[in-house]
């Protein structure tokens, strides 16, 4: 069984092959000093009292997102709606490309608000998505 890749401590087991993608993650603290990890590519977030608990929370949200969309057979459709480019069929794409950051900032008001309101740290994280995307 393949492992789902995510540095935050969550491993998702999958009997399918994985498509490795590079996500932009934004870390910031809100006005209540809550640490937040946000992925504009997936419009998912996790939070906690520390950076580590925020990463773990994000991993849980990511796991839930993947499991739900895979079970509903909508992962490809949801990624397309989020601006991802899927080459091939929606059920079995050959290539999966996350949207560029310029389009993410332009199309997502929440991302612009984060950059305008809070000091942020950004980094890229490789994750594995089930090959059935």
Image (cartoon, helix red, strand yellow):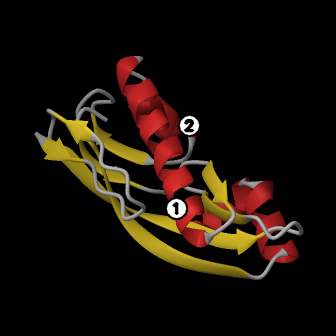
Task: Between residue 96 and residue 39, name the one nearer to us.
Answer: 39
Residue at 89 percent of width and 69 percent of height: 31
Where is residue 34, by image quadrant?
bottom right
Q: Is residue 64 above or below residue 102?
A: above
Task: Between residue 90 and residue 133, name the one nearer to us.
Answer: 133
Q: Is residue 102 above or below residue 127?
A: below
Q: Which residue is mark 2?
A: 81
Task: Between residue 13 and residue 124, name the one nearer to us.
Answer: 13
Which mark's residue is nearer the viewer, 2 or 1?
1
Horizontal side of 70 relative to 68 (left or right) equals left
Residue neighbourhood size for the residue with mark 2, other residues' Cα within 10 Å, grouped as few (<14), some (14–19), many (≥20)? few
Residue neighbourhood size for the residue with mark 1, other residues' Cα within 10 Å, grouped as few (<14), some (14–19), many (≥20)? many
Total labels drawn: 2
Residue at 44 percent of width and 56 percent of height: 98
Q: Which residue is mark 1?
A: 55
User: Which residue lies most toward the left here?
Assistant: 1
Q: Earlier in the sequence, mark 2 or mark 1?
A: 1
Residue at 28 percent of width and 27 percent of height: 91
Q: Where in the figure is residue 62, as x and y percent of width and height?
A: 47, 45
Horizontal side of 118 relative to 45 (left or right) equals right
Residue at 27 percent of width and 30 percent of height: 89
Secondary structure state at the residue bearing disc 2:
helix
């Amino acid at each position: 069984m393949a492992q789902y890749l995510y540095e935050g401590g969550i491993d998702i087991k999958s009997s399918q092959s994985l498509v490795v993608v590079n996500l932009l993650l934004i870390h910031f603290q809100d006005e209540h000093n809550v640490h937040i990890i946000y992925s504009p590519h997936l419009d998912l977030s996790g939070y906690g009292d520390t950076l580590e608990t925020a990463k773990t929370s994000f991993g849980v949200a990511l796991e839930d997102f993947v499991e739900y969309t895979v079970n509903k057979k909508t992962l490809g459709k949801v990624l397309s709606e989020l601006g991802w480019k899927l080459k091939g069929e929606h059920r079995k794409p050959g290539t999966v490309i996350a949207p560029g950051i310029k389009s993410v900032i332009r199309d997502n008001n929440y991302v612009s608000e984060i950059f305008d309101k809070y000091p942020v740290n950004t980094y890229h994280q490789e994750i594995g998505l089930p090959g059935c995307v």
